[in-house]
Image (cartoon, rainbow, N blue to C red):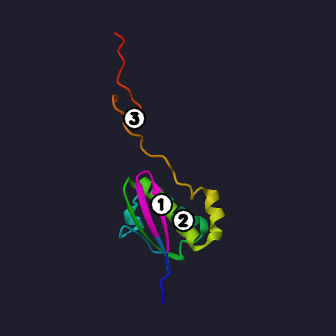
Amino acid sequence: MEKVQYYGTGKRKTSTARVFLMPGAGQFVVNSMDLQEYFTGNAQRAVALEALTLTDMADKFDIYVNVKGGGMSGQAGAIRLGMSRALIDFDLELRPVLKKAGFLRRDPRIKERKKPGQPGARKRYQFSKR
């Protein structure tokens, strides 16, 4: 018997999430930890679960996620994108719902690099006329 699994990759800022969906009872594991242990804040937990709650698939899959890089907010956004892509792999008819919610768009905002001759990306050293 072949084990069925659906896969999606999500990225946000410097975070990368690999999301695996398998038919199951609704277990959610992030980096070998339970979702409640990994994301202690309700905001990040809600972002990570948005795609599942929108499509009413929360109790139909066991979700296993490997995520690395960035902070908690970026990781939660990466998980949401990866989960949305994995759900489309499962059922293509979920695409219009996820697309309308904006869950299939990769957020391109990343930290701007520091430029030479100034203290930050945009900040300049103080100008002295005399």
Ranked by sequence position, the earlier of labels 2 and 3 is 2
Confirm whether residue 6 shows in the render.
Answer: yes
Image coordinates of residue 61 in percent, x first then y, are 51, 76
Per the rendering, the mark at residue 10 is: 1
Main SS of residues in magenta? strand
Instruction: Please tell me whether mark 2 sits on a helix, a strand or a loop.
Output: helix
Residue 85 marker: 2
Read off the magenta span. 6-19
Quarter the C terminus occupies: top left
Q: Earlier in the sequence, mark 1 or mark 2?
A: 1
Q: Amino acid at mark 2?
A: Arg
Residue that sits furthest to the top in the current view: 130
Q: 10 Å neighbourhood of mark 3: few (<14), some, or many (≥20)? A: few
At 46% from the left edge and 57% from the top edge, which residue is drawn? Answer: 11
Residue 23 spot, x, y in % from top left: 51, 79
Give the residue pinned by disc 3.
121
Are dots 1 and 2 in contact, CB under 8 Å?
yes
